[in-house]
Image (cartoon, helix red, strand yellow):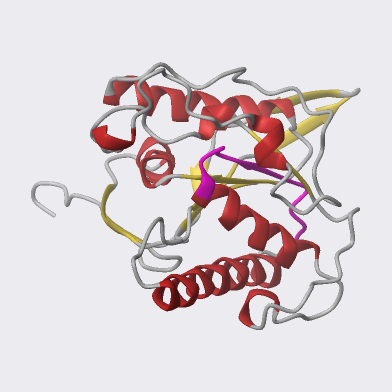
């Protein structure tokens, strides 16, 4: 099973510090509640979480991992109280292949570093995640960020590849991937023929499933299919009607 979550809304900058604090709290609560909803509704455990190195994805992942790993019920981000976590429940790692589209369509030119250094070191980003859950031994599929001015079609192909690569790398585990809006849209449109996304909320997610067969310690898999209904998890889409229907 593969689930993809769009980052939640955490503010980047505000002049009013009280607005910043409140907006940050709202983002934390939304992310934690998304983790709780996933934990309570899917009926089976999430084993691994992979996350884009961009800050707001890291912030989202921190709350979701806490919710997935919490011992008992906790309000977590809602109150700011510490969450008691079971480190055996889920592992989390940064994956560069889940990063934002590296072009001006997604990133403002005034924040693009002149020297090309985005300061998105994976180890530093993982230090922002719950320490009990970080898996420092994972080998990343993408060793570095894509180059700046990555074409849109190339970005979409990257998302398709990374979804399959991670799923194939861990065929016996249920994965949760935390990425950006384009990635979640690609997950739906690539695996549900002719689907057109028209609304994508913060912390929206898509669930993909595929059959996995284990024979003599060798795994074979079928194709992914989308099990998320339109409007069910923050993503709305339509399927074009056939002519004559």
Note whether 217 is above or below 130 in the view shown. above
Q: For the magenta stretch, what is the residue range?
A: 44-55
State the count of labels.
0
Which quarter of the figure has residue 38? bottom right
Picture residue at 80% right of the left edge, 62% below the top: 69
Picture residue at 71% right of the left edge, 67% below the top: 67
Residue 217 pos. (x, y %) = 89, 24
Picture residue at 45% right of the left edge, 65% below the top: 233
Q: Magenta segment: does it hold 218?
A: no
Query: Considering the image in quadrants, where does the C terminus appear?
Result: bottom left
Residue 35 pos. (x, y %) = 64, 65
Which quarter of the figure has residue 188? top left
Picture residue at 71% right of the left edge, 41% below the top: 126
Q: Is residue 57 left or right of residue 168?
A: left
Q: Nearer the viewer, residue 24 or 200?
A: 24
Note whether 155 is above or below 62 in the view shown. above
């Amino acid at each position: 099973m593969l689930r993809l979550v769009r980052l939640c809304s955490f503010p980047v900058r505000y002049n009013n510090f009280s607005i910043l604090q409140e907006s940050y709290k709202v983002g934390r609560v939304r992310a934690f509640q998304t983790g709780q909803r996933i934990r309570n509704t899917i009926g089976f455990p999430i084993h691994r979480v992979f996350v884009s190195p961009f800050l707001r994805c890291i912030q989202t992942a921190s709350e979701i991992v806490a919710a997935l790993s919490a011992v008992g019920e906790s309000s977590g981000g809602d109150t700011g109280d510490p969450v008691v976590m079971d480190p055996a429940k889920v592992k989390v790692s940064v994956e560069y292949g889940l990063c934002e589209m590296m072009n001006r369509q997604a990133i403002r030119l005034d924040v693009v570093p002149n020297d090309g250094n985005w300061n998105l070191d994976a180890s530093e980003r993982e230090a922002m995640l719950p320490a009990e859950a970080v898996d420092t031994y994972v080998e990343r599929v993408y060793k570095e960020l894509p180059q700046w001015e990555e074409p849109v079609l190339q970005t979409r192909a990257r998302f398709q590849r990374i979804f399959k690569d991670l799923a194939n790398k861990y065929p016996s585990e249920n994965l949760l991937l935390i990425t950006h809006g384009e990635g979640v849209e690609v997950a739906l449109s690539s695996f549900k023929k002719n689907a057109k996304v028209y609304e994508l909320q913060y912390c929206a997610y898509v669930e993909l499933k595929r059959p996995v067969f284990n024979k003599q310690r060798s795994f074979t898999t079928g194709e992914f299919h989308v099990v998320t209904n339109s409007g069910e998890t923050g993503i709305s889409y339509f399927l074009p009607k056939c002519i004559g229907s």
